[in-house]
Amino acid sequence: MIGKHVLYLLIICIGCTLAACNPSSDENVKAKLAQAEDIMYSAPDSALQLLEHLQPPKEKEQRATWALLLAQARYRNNVKQSDSLVNVAYDYFEKTDNAERKALSSYIKGGISGDNGDTDKEQELYLEAKDEVRHTKDYRLAFLITSNLCNLYAYRGLKEYAFEALEEAHHYAQLFGDAEYILSSYIFHARIHSIRPINMEKSLHYYREGIKLAKENQNWAKLELMTWEYIGMLCFNGDYEQALQEAHETMELQIPDHLRSKHTLILGNIYRGLDKYDSAYYYLNKTIRESQSPHTKKGAYNYLYNLERERGRYEEALAACEQCLIYTDSIDRSEKAQELIEMQAKYDQQQIIIQRNLLQMEKDRLTRNILILAVVMTVVIGFVVGCYQRALLTKQRKLKQQEELARQNTLKLAENEIQMSRNKQRIAELTQQITSNQELKEQLDEQLEAIKQMKGENNKLQAENQLLLEDINRQTQTFKDISKELEELDRLISQNKHLHEQGDHLAMLLVNRSPLLNKIKNRHPYIKDAEWGELEEELDLIFEHYPKRLQQQVSNISESELRLAYLIKLKMPNKDMAEALGISPASVAKSKMRLKERLSHGILTFDGTKSVDVWLWDF
């Protein structure tokens, strides 16, 4: 009775410990998801930070909602992403009756497909989203879906389909009652009518309607945008007098300075069209002097070039053309520099995420330590209870326990023998690699350390096996009835060891018999992109779905790291891998270090003390 009460108390303690280690409840997660969704349109950057700091929920619906909102926040913040995250939400909500979530997941998945250049998939998903959103009253989402579909049709030259989608978008904007969206629909109307064949009358009509509505709502940003687009269309139509009048009226409006556009370039073009050369020269030169934008200066020199050429002043036209080309080159260099800055910003953001993940890992490690302490306490208490209970058992029960102990010792002995055999094999393989990689000091040190560790492990296992043999001999001498059973068990274990070694041998034979794998391992040519798919299929068949298991364990592994892991599985030296990958041996060593760090972050069971080669050979 005393032992039973202690056991109940032990169970209660474990339950309390596990409950205390749970960092967040379902209600807390649900509240944060709702908060992120509420600010998604008004403050998408804040929503993104909130969702990235939130641990992925375990409950399926909450996890799908978290994945959908995080993908939406990244999409609204123009963060480049794959569709792996939104696919979690898409696959889940597709099986439910939640039309709003189905529409949103299709819309975000379509937008990501468009960003990645797959316009056919983008159109298909937008159409799915449009069908689903009709069953909801989320008019804002309906407007975003149909307006994006309109832009896609316009981009693909399907003008009639674009107008059809635009009418739906305008209808949803009116139902939603947001002037910003209604103004956007007017802009879409005007721009699509300006696509060839141009309907100038309707294009100018929608610009005028939009300008009127923007003035009524004092939406200065949209007013400034539509007014100067309207003036540009008037210039394109040759109506420079009307364009000049609209320009002067716009400049008299009380638009905030931070929203007011630089209009001198457009005025210069208007005066050029009116043959008022002095005014044209004045505004174009003023643009060149005052503007800080190379695009604007390029446009001004382009207009000056046309103006001088029309007047027959070819030397001045040539000078303006040369300046235009200079600013064109400057813009190209600036865009390349901006791309580098964006890449650096993405890298910095990734570093922040890595640091945050490291902090989370520290937190998880502390939690695990608490659990380990609880388990140790459990084991200690259980041992005490077990000792108390064993004192009350009969002689027959003691015999059974000792028989079981003998079997366990035999199994442990066999496991140690298998591990020692495997270590010897790995030591031989690493020694062979060291022979061909002596110029790589860092990799050589790591491999030598791995060999040293495995030799030490073999020494420990040898000593442990000696003790196990002594225990087994004592037990079999005391209980001779189980000797035959242990001998049979030894035979089965030896057979299992032989089968394991034979399996490794057969795997390498299959590698050598595969034309592609044999060529890569023995002749190590440069592997083309088209060959990697075949290489992955061969490894999948020979090594029990090795590529799929690795990608499942480390979902964020890169393509280059995955390819390196494939070559490591073939037990190729660094020098051969360098030739196959088209890089230097030093780069292979550095790539292995990055791969080891990736595995340590992605796989909790990864043994960081082992060489990454040895670990992947056994994976």
Image (cartoon, grey):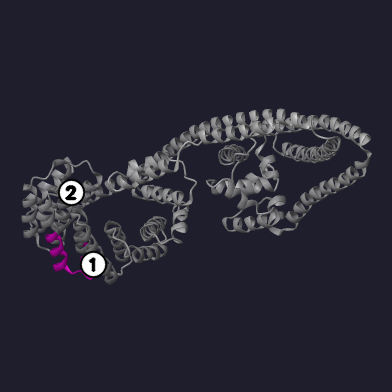
Left or right, residue 163 beside residue 456: left
The amino acid on which the numbered mark 1 sits, given as a three-letter code, is Glu
For marks 1 and 2 on the same chain, the one whose residue lies earlier in the sequence: 1
Left or right, residue 209 beside residue 98: left
Residue ID at (87%, 44%): 490
Residue 157, placed above or below residue 618: below
Magenta residues, start to end: 191-209
| Residue 12 in picture, x, y percent from top left | 58, 34
| Residue 137 in picture, x, y percent from top left | 28, 60
Can residue 237 be seen in this snapshot?
no
Q: Nearer the viewer, residue 145 or 17?
A: 17
| Residue 604 in picture, x, y percent from top left | 60, 39
Alpha carbons under labels 1 and 2: distance apart: 24 Å
* Mark 1, residue position: 167
Residue 459, placed above or below residue 168: above
Q: Nearer the viewer, residue 66 or 550?
A: 66
